[in-house]
Amino acid sequence: MPRDLLLVRAGASRRIAQGSQVSRELKDVGKRGAQKLGIWLCERGLHRADVMAATRADAMVCAEKLLKAAGQSANRIIADDRLAAARLDDNLAALAKGGTGSAPLLCVGSKSAMRNIARHLGAERVTMAAGDMLHLRVADTAFPPGRGAGRFVAHIRPAALAADFPYPDIHGSERRARPAYYYRQSAALPYRREAGRLEVLIISSSRKNHWVLPKGICEPGLSAADSAAKEAWEEAGINGRIDGVSIGRFHQEKWGATCRVDVFPMQVTRIYAPQDWPERHRLRRWVSPQEAAAMVQNPGLAAILARFDGAGIA
């Protein structure tokens, strides 16, 4: 039975030097391109592919963006640095991890690795630019496939795809500037009781020009509450017990449309030192719910904070 093989050359990136280490960071145009490819796969029923990516940062982020735009969890990615190797033997050894299943196999890697695999399978004349995807169909599901075993199906260039994305799902008629999942967000409302006084934690925005709650996009594969807990760690440096039931919703204009944000109370059990959490440039402040309501800019969020009393929350 033939098997679909999708080869993606990691998108446009920039070199980042960190001490003696040099990595490659995917540019915004590369991220949008990967998301467009995710929609293309959805439209053709190829989005439930097995996924492999080179371990370098640009390839991993490219794979993550593609999968999330397709509504899939990024936790499914199998990392293999041989998808960035210069030798064909190494590239094919990585493909061998693709198994013998019938699901499509999606590989994200370097220019040289994707070129090697494409030529090995018979697509010698295809030149892949950064961010391009090559769709091949191989004659046997056993991997790695033999020389000349591939049949060319399509060469997909993100620049030739629609610049916007369907909403609220792949079948939606509305178009938005970002993939649909960007507009479904969740926030943690961190709280504690100190000397009998209820306090909530607010943090500065990324530019430190106003106060907010830890919040972010609901990650495909995670519940809204679990996504909120993840943001609490990344943005506020806290862990805790998050309630699975939202206590309210507010709305925020972003990316040319309206995001809905569900709020989940979180009883804080650990506060990390400033050097121990990802977005430590943010400020943190413990205040009463009423003080927090007066400090945030969003009226809907202010209303949720003003009525929060911690009652009935374990």
Image (spheres, grey):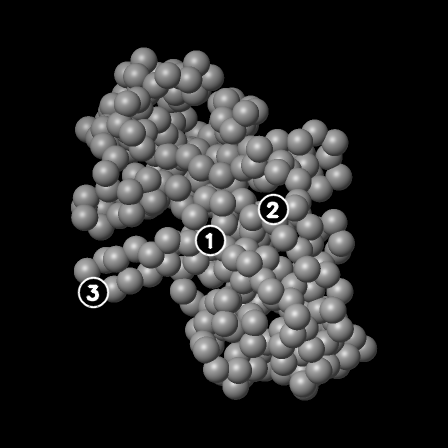
Q: List the residue tagged with mark 1.
A: 12
Q: Residue at x 75, y 65 (%)?
A: 153
Structural distance between the alpha carbons of marks 2 and 1: 12 Å
Q: Residue at x 50, y 22 (%)?
A: 253
Q: Is residue 22 visible?
A: yes
Q: List the residue tagged with mark 3.
A: 20
**Nearer to me, 10 or 76:** 10
Residue 226, image x, y percentages: 47, 45
- Quadrant of the image occupied by residue 144: bottom right
- Quadrant of the image occupied by residue 301: top left
Structural distance between the alpha carbons of marks 3 and 2: 35 Å
Task: Please name the amino acid that badge 1 sits on.
Answer: Ala
Q: Secondary structure at mark 2?
A: helix
Tag of residue 159: 2
Quadrant of the image containing the C terminus? top left
N-terminal of the pair, mark 3 or mark 2, is 3
Q: Secondary structure at mark 3?
A: loop
Few, some or many residues within 10 Å of mark 1 (<14, 14–19, 20+):
some
